[in-house]
């Protein structure tokens, strides 16, 4: 269940970006939030980076500073149109994350922010399979998304946010053992780094 604010946040970019900036204050601001999953990545000038579920390019903006070879994939034509307009230096593809139109072993890095919590459990597993397939051996899947708060003071804020903007998939997602799913697939996973009272997790998983 979600409120009308969810529809509005996708319809009006100023609302999505405003809410995102407000939420990012919990980790020290938008710029820090956008770079949490980009720490310690080993990149070279030819690194091929995929911004999975790129939306309107909120994280793509930071990825194009790391490599000239950034591809943004999203299912929404409207979001991609906004990305192309905001950040023409990346390549954009309209597709579903669970069925990506890429060759095996195409990317050095697959990044995704604030998107996996929108997936149904089976869809999430399919996306993990696809990410594994399109990554080169040694490539890294790096993500930032919700996590159950470890500091109870953060539960009311997260619950309000979920009620206003999310659906039941977000509640299901925070109960999911994401590192476990990634390990089963064959990724080597470091312990998630937690932020904002534990309500955000950053995971970097390497394809063996
Ligand atoms: C909450 S937005 C996140 C956007 C951006 N990554 C960010 O950090 O702000 C989730 C995005 O995932 C996209 N999306 C949802 N399901 C998808 C799917 N199955 N395949 C590709 N994109 C999907 C939506 O269109 C939306 O742009």
Image (tube, rainbow, N blue to C red):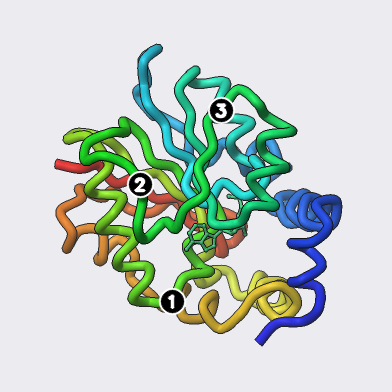
- Spot occupied by residue 196 in the image (x, y as percentages of width and height): 61, 57
Q: Residues within 10 Å of mark 2 (few under 14, many from 20)?
A: some
Residue at label 1?
120
Q: In the rendered picture of this protein, how many numbered marks are placed on residues?
A: 3
- Spot occupied by residue 44 in the image (x, y as percentages of width and height): 36, 15
- What mark, if any, has residue 77 been given in the picture? none
Mark in the foreground, 3 or 1? 3
Q: Earlier in the sequence, mark 3 or mark 1?
A: 3
Residue at label 2?
101
Q: CA distance from mark 2 to mark 1?
A: 21 Å
Q: In the picture provided, is 1 more to the left or to the right than 100?
A: right
Mark in the foreground, 3 or 2? 2
| Local SS, label 2 | loop
Q: CA distance from mark 3 to mark 2?
A: 17 Å
Classify mark 1 as within 8 Å of ligand 1 or not, answering yes or no: no
Are circles 2 and 1 on residues that touch, CB within 8 Å? no
Mark in the foreground, 2 or 1? 2
Tell me which residue sits at (54%, 75%) in the image: 170
**Quadrant for ligand 1?**
bottom right
- Spot occupied by residue 100 in the image (x, y as percentages of width and height): 36, 51
Are circles 3 and 2 on residues that touch, CB within 8 Å? no
Are circles 3 and 1 on residues that touch, CB within 8 Å? no
| Local SS, label 1 | loop
- What mark, if any, has residue 90 been given in the picture? 3
Q: Nearer the viewer, residue 202 or 62?
A: 62
Q: Is residue 39 above or below residue 1?
A: above
Q: Is residue 151 above or below residue 26?
A: below
Tell me which residue sits at (64%, 31%) in the image: 61
| Local SS, label 3 | loop
Q: Nearer the viewer, residue 126 or 102?
A: 102
Q: Nearer the viewer, residue 170 or 135?
A: 135
């Amino acid at each position: 269940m979600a409120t009308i604010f969810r529809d509005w946040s996708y319809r009006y970019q100023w609302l999505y970006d405003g809410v995102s900036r407000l939420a990012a204050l919990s980790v020290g601001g938008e710029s820090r939030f956008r770079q949490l999953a980009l720490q310690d990545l080993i990149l070279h000038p030819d690194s091929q980076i995929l911004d999975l579920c790129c939306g309107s390019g909120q994280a793509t903006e930071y990825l194009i500073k790391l490599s000239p070879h950034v591809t943004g994939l999203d299912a929404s034509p409207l979001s991609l149109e906004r990305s192309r307009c905001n950040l023409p230096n990346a390549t954009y593809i309209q597709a579903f994350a669970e069925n990506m139109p890429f060759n095996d072993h195409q990317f050095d890095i697959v990044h995704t922010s604030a998107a996996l919590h929108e997936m149904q459990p089976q869809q999430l597993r399919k996306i993990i399979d696809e990410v594994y397939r399109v990554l080169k051996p040694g490539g890294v899947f790096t993500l930032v998304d919700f996590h159950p708060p470890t500091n109870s003071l953060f539960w009311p804020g997260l619950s309000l946010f979920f009620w206003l903007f999310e659906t039941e998939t977000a509640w299901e997602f925070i109960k999911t053992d994401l590192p476990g799913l990634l390990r089963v697939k064959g990724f080597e996973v470091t312990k998630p780094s937690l932020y904002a009272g534990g309500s955000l997790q950053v995971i970097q998983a390497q394809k063996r």
